[in-house]
């Protein structure tokens, strides 16, 4: 039996904030819309809506898989910030050879 704890559920507002943050990080990592869409498992139109800063009342329903993917992007970004001192390496690491 699966029991949901209401204190652990995220509001739609938190979901949008997390999504927008993950998309901003992916943009700084030079991911294309297609790549970001694949990484987060969301449509390109959802990415476009999330990037629209004028649309402050926009909400989206995200399933657990998408929220976990957002969490992974945020955690990878956090780990890179711990490893590297300068932003050039934090955001350029993905493209380093």
Image (cartoon, grey):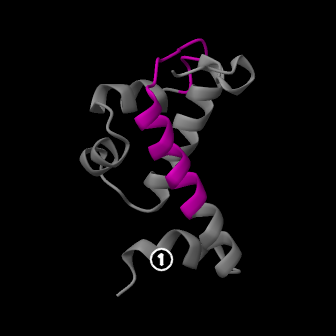
Eyeballing the image, is 93 above or below 42? below
Eyeballing the image, is 38 above or below 48? below
Residue located farthest toward the left when viewing the structure as drawn: 34
The residue wearing badge 1 is 93
Residue located farthest toward the bottom when viewing the structure as drawn: 97
- Where does the magenta region start and end? 53-76
Residue 55 among magenta residues: yes
Residue in the foreground of this view, choosing between 79 and 23: 79
Residue located farthest toward the top when viewing the structure as drawn: 57
The percent coordinates of residue 68 (x first, y second) are 49, 42
Residue in the foreground of this view, choosing between 82 and 6: 6
On the rendered structure, is 65 left or right of 78?
A: left
What residue is shown at x 60% (from left), y 72% (from top)?
Answer: 80
Residue in the foreground of this view, choosing between 78 and 63: 63
What residue is shown at x 53% (from left), y 14% (from top)?
Answer: 58
What residue is shown at x 28% (from left), y 30% (from top)?
Answer: 43
Eyeballing the image, is 69 above or below 75? above
SS of the residue under disc 1: helix
What residue is shown at x 37% (from left), y 42% (from top)?
Answer: 40
Q: Callout 1 environment at 10 Å: few (<14), some (14 to 19), or many (20+)?
A: few
State the quadrant of the C terminus. Answer: bottom left
The percent coordinates of residue 79 (x first, y second) are 63, 69
Residue located farthest toward the right when viewing the structure as drawn: 7
Residue in the foreground of this view, choosing between 39 and 95: 39
The percent coordinates of residue 84 (x first, y second) are 65, 80
The percent coordinates of residue 90 (x first, y second) are 58, 72
Eyeballing the image, is 54 above or below 69? above
Residue 96 among magenta residues: no
């Amino acid at each position: 039996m699966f029991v949901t704890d209401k204190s652990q559920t995220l509001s739609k507002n938190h979901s949008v904030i997390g999504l927008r943050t993950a998309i901003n990080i992916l943009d700084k990592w030079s991911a294309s819309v297609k790549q970001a869409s694949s990484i987060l498992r969301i449509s390109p139109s959802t990415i476009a809506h999330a990037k629209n800063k004028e649309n402050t009342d926009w909400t989206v329903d995200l399933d657990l898989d998408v929220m976990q993917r957002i969490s992974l992007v945020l955690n990878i970004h956090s780990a890179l910030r711990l490893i590297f001192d300068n932003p050039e390496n934090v955001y350029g690491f993905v493209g380093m050879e």
